[in-house]
């Protein structure tokens, strides 16, 4: 019996050919025991995943391009702007599908949040009044700004002294709810 358990330990630790598993199962049946389940790392996608997968894969490809894009001639903060923009776009896509259009199930929505396809904290802010158009979380964190305020992109357009302003953190030109 000890040898049988050691063999199962090897099977679970190393990948073995699929034709060996039924033989091990038969050995366990002869010994009067059941073979332990082998855990797989494969993710089970919920129903409806095939509808949103092409768009998410496309956005992930663009994200990969943005990460590998050379940033010669750009300021350090400007190199991150396309990444922030694509992260916002992915989160907004999933948010709109669930909360506005109601085209995906709660299970699929939670799966996307758990797997990192969307930013859970940013979506939580979008649900609150005054933050419906928030571009990124850095724009509302007082520790990242002078005088412990929020970013200039959070100021409504009719209250700005300058008409064209870009956020230093993410390149946003205005995400105030009143605009």
Image (spheres, grey):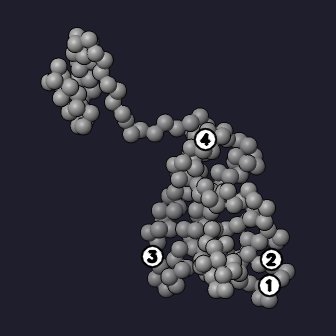
Q: Mark 3 or 2 closer to N-term?
A: 3
C-alpha gap between disc 4 and disc 2? 35 Å
Q: Mark 4 and 3 residues: CB-CB less than 8 Å, in contact? A: no
Say what secondary structure mark 3 lies in.
Answer: loop
State the residue position of label 3: 70
The span from disc 1 to disc 2 (Cα, nearest Å) is 7 Å
**Front-most of residues 89 and 134:** 134
Q: Give me the C-alpha separation between circle 3 and circle 1.
A: 33 Å
Of label 4 and label 2, which has the lower sequence position? 4
Of the residues under marks 4 and 3, which one precedes in the sequence?
3
Q: Is residue 56 visible?
A: no
Of callouts 1 and 4, the N-terminal one: 4
The residue that mark 4 highlights is 108
Of residues 173 and 152, the one nearer the viewer is 152
Vertically, is 90 above or below 172?
A: above
Q: Residue at x 61, y 38 (%)?
A: 107
Residue 53 place in picture, x, y as percent: 56, 45
Q: Is mark 4 on a helix, strand or loop?
A: helix
Q: Residue at x 25, y 16 (%)?
A: 28
Q: Name the residue under label 2.
A: 156
Q: Is residue 2 above or below residue 78?
A: above
Residue 94 in sight here: yes
Above or below, comparing residue 36 to residue 103 in the picture? above
Residue 145: assigned label = none
Q: Disc 3 or disc 2, which is closer to the eye?
A: 2
User: What residue is shown at x 47% (from left), y 79% (from top)?
Assistant: 71
Going from the N terminus, do you reach mark 3 or mark 1 first? 3
Q: Which mark is residue 160?
A: 1
Instruction: Please say if the residues under marks 3 and 2 sit with CB atoms less than 8 Å apart.
Output: no
């Amino acid at each position: 019996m000890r040898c049988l358990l050691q063999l199962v330990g090897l099977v679970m630790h190393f990948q073995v050919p699929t034709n060996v598993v039924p033989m091990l199962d038969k050995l366990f049946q002869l010994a009067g025991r059941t073979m332990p389940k082998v855990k797989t790392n494969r993710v089970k996608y919920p129903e409806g995943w095939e509808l949103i997968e092409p768009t998410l894969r496309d956005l992930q490809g663009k994200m990969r391009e943005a990460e590998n894009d050379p940033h010669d001639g750009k300021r350090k903060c400007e190199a991150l702007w396309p990444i922030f923009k694509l992260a916002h776009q992915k989160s907004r896509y999933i948010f709109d599908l669930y909360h506005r259009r109601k085209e995906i199930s709660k299970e699929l929505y939670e799966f996307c949040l758990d797997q990192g396809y969307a930013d859970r904290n940013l979506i939580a802010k979008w649900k609150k009044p005054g933050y419906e158009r928030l571009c990124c979380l850095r724009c509302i964190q007082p520790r990242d700004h002078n005088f412990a305020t929020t970013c200039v992109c959070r100021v409504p357009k009719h209250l700005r002294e300058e008409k064209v302003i870009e956020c230093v953190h993410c390149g946003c030109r205005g995400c105030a709810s009143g605009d």
